[in-house]
């Protein structure tokens, strides 16, 4: 059986330095890309990997489906396995009603065995997650699935470091496509976590920014929501990523949940043309809704509103019932 990199899952090889998985010594556990990323912070995008249902070998094994509480997707992958929904990065939202959130997630994403709020960054609820994994697993193999950048590998690293003697660690980075193949990590004798490549959603803004902006948007600091009272003909601009014009409606409350690194500005329509070069479209927003921009965050809008959005044409923003 071919040896694979413990960091990203790529098949290791010693024959061609220009190809993925290259190492000088086959006894090495990490490919050159992972080694340089771990020790020097250098990221080289040399492999395009995406989750495939074939990554799950046994349709009866338990799946841990990890999502990012800030950057939720409109739809999840249609996985038939028994599965637990794990909502990661909860430390980014402070003063939240956790039970209220769980009920919201049950409504948005039905058909899971259980729902758990966790934080790989602060270790919140990891004990409970381990308990649930042992309760629901059908064999020793448990698959970890989710979109890129939801913190799958970080979560696995924390589980391994806290509940196992295994010294292996997965490679993590803010860029999509870091994990390129299934990686097995023994947590206990009868429990093996299998990391899978992250599903790369084409509608996420992170696919259309450079490394500097990726790091900027992937802040690990708790978000501090900013609320603006807008009248018609006012606009909100989030750095140079998007623009939202308030076209019609009563005086309204717009609460923005995004990285602290993102500069937020408010103008009247006539005072700024910034971001108007982007693709634009109008959206009718119902009462108590979130306008979600995958990879950037979301905007909670209190009352019914009509807005015009300017954003990269490939980013698939959507409207949902507010989760907060």
Image: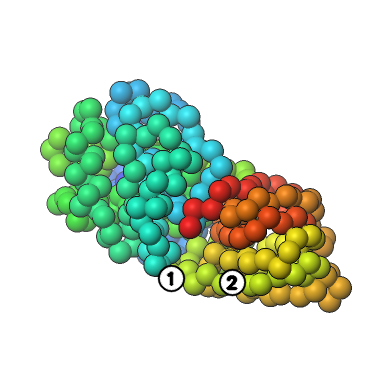
- Count residues near mark 1 (Cα–Cα under 10 Å), then give few for <14, some for 14-19, many for 20+: few
When the figure is inspected, residue 237 is found, relative to residue 10, above or below; the finding is below
Image coords of residue 8 (percent x, y)? 39, 46
Residue positioned 48% across, 58% down in the render: 324
Q: Nearer the viewer, mark 2 or mark 1?
A: 2
The residue wearing badge 2 is 227
Dot 2 falls on a residue whose secondary structure is: strand
Location of residue 118 (image quadrant): bottom left
Q: Among all residues in the image, which is located at the extreme top?
A: 59
- Count residues near mark 2 (Cα–Cα under 10 Å), then give few for <14, some for 14-19, many for 20+: some
Residue positioned 49% across, 37% down in the render: 76
Residue positioned 23% across, 41% down in the render: 132
Horizontal relation, residue 73 to residue 90: left or right: right
Image coords of residue 69 (percent x, y)? 45, 54
Total numbered labels? 2
Res. 28 visible in picture: no
When the figure is inspected, residue 7 is found, relative to residue 197, above or below; the finding is below
In the picture, the disc for residue 119 is: none
Residues tagged 2 and 1 counted as in contact (Cβ below 8 A): no
Image coords of residue 294 (percent x, y)? 58, 52
Horizontal relation, residue 31 to residue 190: left or right: right
The residue wearing badge 1 is 221
Location of residue 94 (image quadrant): bottom left
């Amino acid at each position: 059986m071919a040896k694979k990199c413990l960091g990203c899952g790529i098949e290791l090889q010693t024959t061609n330095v220009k190809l993925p998985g290259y190492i000088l010594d086959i006894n090495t556990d990490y490919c050159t890309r992972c080694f340089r990323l771990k020790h020097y912070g250098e990221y080289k995008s040399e492999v395009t990997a995406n989750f495939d249902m074939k990554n799950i070998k046994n349709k009866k094994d338990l799946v841990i489906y990890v999502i990012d509480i800030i950057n939720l997707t409109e739809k999840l992958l249609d996985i038939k396995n028994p599965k637990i929904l794990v909502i990661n990065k909860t430390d980014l939202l402070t003063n939240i009603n956790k039970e209220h959130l769980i009920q919201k997630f049950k409504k948005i994403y039905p058909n899971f065995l259980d729902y758990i709020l966790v934080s790989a960054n602060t270790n919140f609820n990891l004990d409970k997650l381990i308990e649930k994994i042992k309760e629901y697993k059908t064999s020793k193999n448990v698959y970890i699935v989710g979109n890129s950048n939801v913190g799958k590998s970080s979560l696995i690293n924390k589980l391994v470091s806290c509940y196992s003697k295994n010294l292996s660690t997965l490679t993590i980075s803010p860029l999509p496509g870091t994990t390129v193949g299934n990686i097995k990590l023994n947590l206990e004798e009868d429990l093996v976590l299998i990391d899978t490549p992250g599903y790369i959603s084409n509608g996420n803004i992170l696919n259309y920014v450079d490394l500097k902006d990726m790091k900027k948007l992937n802040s690990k600091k708790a978000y501090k929501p900013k609320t603006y009272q807008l009248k018609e003909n006012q606009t909100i601009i989030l750095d140079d990523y998007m623009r939202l014009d308030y076209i019609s409606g009563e005086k309204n409350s717009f609460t923005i949940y995004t990285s602290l690194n993102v500069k937020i500005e408010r103008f009247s329509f006539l005072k700024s043309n910034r971001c108007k070069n982007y693709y634009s479209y109008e959206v009718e927003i119902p009462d108590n809704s979130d306008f979600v921009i995958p990879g950037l965050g979301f905007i909670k809008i209190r009352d019914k509103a009509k807005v015009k959005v300017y954003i990269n044409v490939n980013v698939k923003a959507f409207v949902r019932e507010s989760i907060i």
